[in-house]
Amino acid sequence: MSRRLPPAQTGAALVVGLVLLLVLTLLAVSTMRTAALELLMAGNTQYRENAFRLAEAGLADAVGQAQGLVNPTTGWTTDLGTVRIDDLDGEYQATITFLDEGEVYSGYSSSEFQFFHYQIDATGSADQRGARSTQSQGLVAVNLRSPE
């Protein structure tokens, strides 16, 4: 009785399995790198938004202080200094610059008002990754003229 031996195996199943495993590994590594990059981009967006909010807080603070100023001189600038806001993990710096005293526009019947033009500049700096935002705003304060 003679038995037939199976034909010699060439290992094709092993090679195909290893190639598929390599492809799956490359896909997994690529997906992980993409996810890490997207997480980094989302973090950068958050830090830029925090810097923007810090600059806006500086503008709001400066507007509040500029409205109490009376009879400044042209070219006058005040620095509000550096203010830290821990809720936003950063700080802002703001300056108020007096530009000039405006004229009463034609059509207005009152000459007893003064119009003071200011420029406010604020820079917000988030602690993470050096995110910064600079905002500028104009302001016109209306004051009653002093009786002469």
Image (cartoon, rainbow, N blue to C red):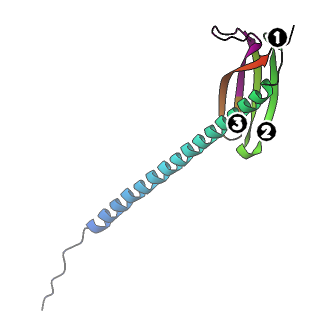
> Marks 3 and 2: CB-CB under 8 Å?
no
Instruction: Count neighbours of disc 2 (C-alpha within 10 A) and say few if under 14, some if 14 to 19, many if 20 or more.
Output: some
N-term-proximal mark, 3 vs 2: 3
Q: Does 120 sit left or right of 4 as displayed?
A: right
Using a 10 Å C-alpha cutoff, classify the residue at mark 1 as few (fewer than 14 neighbours), some (14 to 19) or many (20 or more).
Answer: few
Q: Residue at x 41, y 54 (%)?
A: 26
Residue visible at 40% across and 55% down? 27
Q: Are marks 1 and 2 in contact (CB under 8 Å)?
A: no
Q: Amino acid at mark 1?
A: Thr
| Measured Cα–Cα span from mark 3 to mark 1 | 29 Å
Disc ID at residue 73: 1
Please tell me which residue lies in front, 27 or 38: 38
In this picture, is 10 found above or below 141? below
Q: Label 2 is placed on what type of residue? A: Arg
Residue range highlighted in magenta: 99-122
In this rendering, does residue 11 appear at all? no
Instruction: Please tell me whether mark 3 sits on a helix, a strand or a loop.
Output: helix
Camera-side residue: 122 or 73? 73
Which residue was labeled with disc 2?
Answer: 84
- Judged left or right of residue 110, residue 23 is left
Of mark 3 and mark 1, the one earlier in the sequence is 3
Which residue is denoted by mark 3 in the rendering? 54
Taking the magenta stretch, the answer to whether it contains residue 108 is: yes
Where 7 falls versus 41 (above or below)? Answer: below
Q: Which quadrant of the structure image shows residue 129?
A: top right
Residue 120 point in image, percent of width and height: 72, 22
